[in-house]
Amino acid sequence: MREHVLEISTEVFHMLQQQSPGYVSWAEEEPGPTQKILVGEDVYTEFIDRAIAHHQTLDQVIREACTRTRNQIFSGGGPGGDTRRLKKTK
């Protein structure tokens, strides 16, 4: 599977760390306003398509996905998306 790099704000990066701490490490954060993450092609396509369709930024799309996933967990609806597909780039 091909992978793509997405550049997101550090704020959203921190949200990802809290949502899936085993997959995004604090040690991998770089100084600066943005961070880069590596995602699978299917995740990349989903994020880009959703951003275009809803006239949103990637940060908004990822924040929404994290919020939706968290709400599904708390309501017993399952984990939602597969966070194992998110990786921090080097």
Image (cartoon, rainbow, N blue to C red):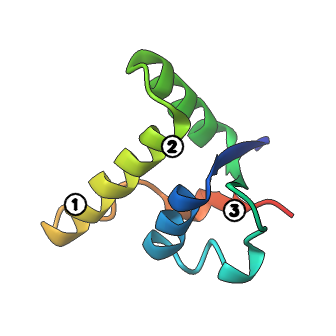
Amino acid type for the residue under numbered disc 3: Lys
Give the mark count. 3
Pointer 1: residues within 10 angstroms few (<14), some, or many (20+)?
some
Residue plotted at (58% across, 80% down): 22
Q: Which residue is mark 2?
A: 59
Regarding mark 3 in the picture, which secondary structure is present there? strand
Residue plotted at (74% across, 82% down): 27
Q: Which residue is mark 3?
A: 87
Q: Position of residue 87 (x, y in %)?
A: 69, 62
Choose top left, top right, bottom left or bottom right for residue 74: bottom left
Asked whether the residues under the numbered discs 2 and 3 touch, taking CB atoms below 8 Å apart as contact, a structural biologist would say: no
Residue plotted at (57% across, 64% down): 84
Amino acid type for the residue under numbered disc 2: Asp
Which of the two labelled residues, at mark 1 and mark 2, occupies the earlier sequence position?
2
Residue projecting furthest to the right? 90
Regarding mark 2 in the picture, which secondary structure is present there? helix
Q: Which residue is mark 1?
A: 72
Regarding mark 1 in the picture, which secondary structure is present there? helix
Which one is in front, 51 or 73? 51
Q: CA distance from mark 1 to mark 2?
A: 20 Å
Q: CA distance from mark 2 to mark 3?
A: 16 Å
The image quadrant where one finds the N terminus is: top right
Q: Is residue 27 above or below residue 31?
A: below
- Residue 34 lies left or right of residue 71; in this view the side is right
